[in-house]
Amino acid sequence: MPKIFFKSDSSLAMARYLDAPWSILYYMGRLIPKPIRDSLYDRFANRRYESFGRTNECQRPIQEYEKRFIDWRESNQKHD
């Protein structure tokens, strides 16, 4: 059964599987106490529409970017 992550833990879990230098964020982020990480996560989440815009529909990636997405089933098998 897959693990469920919340707030900053979810971001760190994703960063762990990215290529360097982004994967370093996982290790650096783990050094920050969870209440502080979650507070920073909440501040960013509250401003995400200002940074990235808002749409009424879930967007699908264009075909040339689909290969960049991680299939969670594949990821679980490689790192369990």
Image: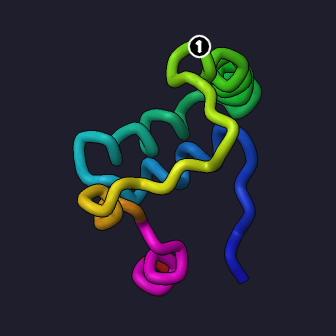
What is the image's colouring? rainbow
Q: How many marks?
A: 1
> Residue 16 appears at what percent x and percent y?
43, 54
Residue 59 lies, with reference to residue 40, above or below; the image says: below
Q: Which residues are magenta?
A: 70-78
Residue 17 lies, with reference to residue 15, above or below; the image says: below
> Residue 43 appears at what percent x and percent y?
69, 16
> Residue 5 appears at what percent x and percent y?
71, 55
> Residue 35 appears at what percent x and percent y?
76, 27
Asked which quadrant contains residue 26, the reply is top left
Circle 1 sits in a helix, a strand or a loop, which is it? Answer: helix
Kindly identify the residue that appears in the image at 72 percent across and 19 percent down: 46
The front one of 9 and 56 is 56
Kindly identify the residue that appears in the image at 53 percent across and 73 percent down: 72
Residue 18 lies, with reference to residue 4, above or below; the image says: above
Kindly identify the residue that appears in the image at 52 percent across and 17 percent down: 51
Asked which quadrant contains residue 42, the reply is top right
1 magenta-colored: no
Q: Is residue 25 left or right of residue 58?
A: left
Kindly identify the residue that appears in the image at 41 percent across and 54 percent down: 61
Q: Which residue is mark 1?
A: 50
The front one of 64 and 69 is 64
Outermost residue, front direction? 56
Callout 1 environment at 10 Å: few (<14), some (14 to 19), or many (20+)? few
Amino acid of disc 1: Glu
- Dividing the image into 4 quarters, which one contains the N terminus? bottom right
